[in-house]
Amino acid sequence: MFYLKYRPKKIEEIDNERVKDIVKNILKEKTPPHALLFIGQKGTGKTSTARIFAKAVNCQENKFNKKNSSAIEPCGKCSNCAMIDNSTSPDVVEMDAASNRGIEDIKKLIKEAAFFPMNTKYRVFIIDEAHMITTDAFNALLKTLEEPPSSVIFILATTNLEKIPKTIVSRCSIVNFGKAKKSDIIDMLNRIAKGENLKTDEKLFSLIATQADKSFRDAAKSYEELVIQNKLNYEDAKNFLGVARNDFWEVIKNRNLAKTLAWIKDFSGNGGNVKNLIEELLEELHVSLLATNGVSIEVEESIKLNKTEIVLLLKLLSEAYQNLRYSPIESLPLELAIVEFYNKSKPN
Ligand SMILES: Nc1ncnc2c1ncn2[C@@H]1O[C@H](COP(=O)(O)OP(=O)(O)O)[C@@H](O)[C@H]1O
Ligand SMILES: [Mg+2]
Ligand SMILES: [Zn+2]
């Protein structure tokens, strides 16, 4: 899978430029910090960077283990690098705090931190979803963070800074991953295309990057899907990625039947899949239905309909969806649903 195959393995491969610089500067210091806090949305490279960090401080071929070297990049070839890459190093421990969040789990970890590394210079503990750790467990961890054994590095990763106690935060060097920038995602897509011998395509990559919800992972996944489905031409990709539905909400906002029907004709003429489109629209409307009735979910901002209109359109589109199977013209059920929607939702 692209997102695993092209997971950054070296500092230079971290496509998040800002993070790359911060990590470089930290590693240039004489000694690395003993506690780091990686904050950022999912899919922005926290886990990948934590592993690169573990390799960098333990590589046998860079400044951390070689007297005359000033290199900070892990070589990727020595036995330490190799073991960390294969997740077989006894000195790099990854823990998911979503399932190991209690005091006993943390105590076990602290006990382990007291041992010297077996093969490396530093034992690195990577704690993912760190905001899930319980209060008791955080307190236990705090003591260790105040006086960490010199051979230990903790890397806490979280999507949710507010849930990490201030006392913990203040003990850590903070690296803010934020959200993935569009230009950085495009760099990653170019890197993947090169590796896969695929044609690079700025317009397509820009489309994928916009749709990727500011996540490197999502972008890598979408790109792979487009490759597998052979939808690398811009229009195909646009329909496949569901960009169409945003256009759809734009169009129906104006209640212009002729324009809406023309849009549907174009959509379907360009190879758009009406069934997928209706599914996506229903999904979004469903979320809006729950949200407008007080079930708090993030609302899709593109839908500008009131409660009654949402219910009406949900009904009509569900019907259209049922009728797709029997319709001799693929776009007809959707067209009929729109005609009826405009008729019934007219203000007078
Ligand atoms: N900075 C980055 N540069 C390039 N690819 C990245 C970057 N960050 C994440 N990715 C891609 O996204 C995937 C998930 O990244 P990961 O490090 O697990 O993110 P997180 O831990 O923040 O959820 C990686 O396998 C890689 O394909
Ligand atoms: Mg992660
Ligand atoms: Zn190495």
Image (cartoon, grey):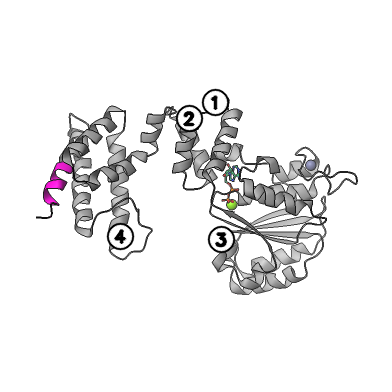
Q: Could you tell me which quadrant the C terminus lies in? A: bottom left
In-image side of 80 versus 339 (left or right):
right
Label 2–label 1 contact, CB within 8 A: yes
Q: Residues within 10 Å of mark 3 (few under 14, many from 20)?
A: some
In-image side of 215 versus 16 (left or right):
left
Give the magenta part as a residue range: 338-348
Q: CA distance from mark 4 to mark 2?
A: 35 Å
Q: Which residue is mark 1?
A: 198
Q: Which mark is residue 290?
A: 4
Q: Which residue is mark 3?
A: 98
Q: Residues within 10 Å of mark 4 (few under 14, many from 20)?
A: some
Tag 1 secondary structure:
loop
Image coords of residue 23 (percent x, y):
70, 51
In-image side of 218 versus 252 (left or right):
right
Tag 3 secondary structure:
loop
Tag 2 secondary structure:
helix
In-image side of 258 versus 127 (left or right):
left
- State which mark lies toward you, 3 or 2: 2
Q: Which residue is mark 2?
A: 227
Note whether 275 is above or below 139 in the view shown: above
Note whether 182 is above or below 195 in the view shown: below
Type of amino acid at the residue the image marks with label 2? Val
Note whether 311 is above or below 340 in the view shown: below
Type of amino acid at the residue the image marks with label 4? Leu
